[in-house]
Amino acid sequence: MACSTHKHYHDEEFDPKLLLETYFSHGNVPIIEESVIHPVRVLHELFCSGKVKGDTLLDINLGGAIYQLISASNCFKEMYVVDFTDCNIDHFKKWLEKNEGATDWSFAFQKVCEIEGSGDKWQEKEEQLRKTIKGIIKWDNFENSSLNHQLFPKVDCVLCLWILNVVSKTKEEFQRNLKKFACCLKPGGHLILFSGVNVTYYMLGKHKFFILSVDRDFIRESVTNAGFVIEKEDYLSTKVTTDIVDYKGMAIILARKQSECPI
């Protein structure tokens, strides 16, 4: 279905707290195994393996989500978060500053602690993550060609879960945005990319929102063309049928930046 028939990420109907409650923040989400539990398990394994190293990480954020950063806080001294709209940044700050109305992430922290074997120390883990986040940056992807690197240093790792399909309206824009993300990395730095495969929409309440539909070959080609060498690739087919999102599976790629690629 054409992008023009759906709402988009930056439209005023986008509600970050509703997004998180619908897809990520608690155990009653119908796709929770695929949207949160499998990703945090993969990220835990990647960060524990020593394949992804360094001091700094940049998260290209979706709607104020934080679950993808929990295991990363064990490895990186500094983490920076980028989002594209004020409402999403404001919602992320509510959790960071322990303000009223913040999303409750106890489910995700408890799940990560279970995976890590750290028992009931999830509240300590939450404070650890807060201390590691050094900046939240707005990137108006729809107007500016790249991030202002005066706001944060070039990083050792860029983490990108789901957002690339959400903010990119065309395949050409998907590829341009991926190259912009690559520019944030130091030479030899790593990209961790999770992307929905063959998905066209997701629901927020009564509103249907656009997602760019791409296949595995296109994702792989785009990563390579952005100056990366793919070091690890995985794919998880969906096992859940739901009317809140129509996807076939998720592609997971770990790639190392080999060269600069002009935007």
Image: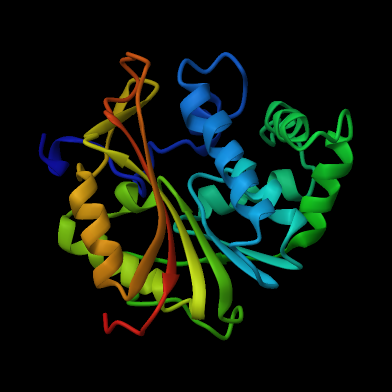
> Is 229 left, or right, of 42 in this rendering?
left
The way the protein has been coloured in the rendering is rainbow
Q: Measured from the top left, where is residue 110 in percent x and y?
A: 76, 29
In the depicted structure, whether residue 84 falls above or below residue 156: above
- Kindly identify the residue that appears in the image at 77 percent across and 42 percent down: 99
Question: Does the image show residue 91?
Answer: no
Query: For this rendering, which residue is in front, 151 or 15?
Result: 151
- Residue 13 placement, left or right of 65: left
Q: Is residue 219 visible?
A: yes
In the rendered image, residue 194, in percent from the top left (x then y), is placed at 42, 47
Residue 40 screen position, x and y as percent: 60, 39
Quadrant where the image shows the N terminus: top left
Q: How many marks?
A: 0
Q: Position of residue 72 (x, y in %)?
A: 68, 54
233 or 127, which lies in front?
A: 233
Q: Name the quadrant of the C terminus.
A: bottom left
Q: Please, is residue 98 above or below residue 50 in the view?
A: above
Q: In the image, what residue occupies the spot 70% across and 72% down?
A: 55
Q: Taking 115 as reference, is 62 left or right?
A: left
Nearer to the camera, 209 or 31: 31
Q: Which residue occupies the extreme left position in the image?
A: 2
Image quarter for residue 157?
A: bottom right
Residue plotted at (70% across, 26% down): 107
Residue at position x 59%, y 51% from top? 46
Vertical order, 40 against 225 (above or below)? above
On the picture, is 118 further left or further right than 242? right
**Is 113 placed above or below 228 here?**
above
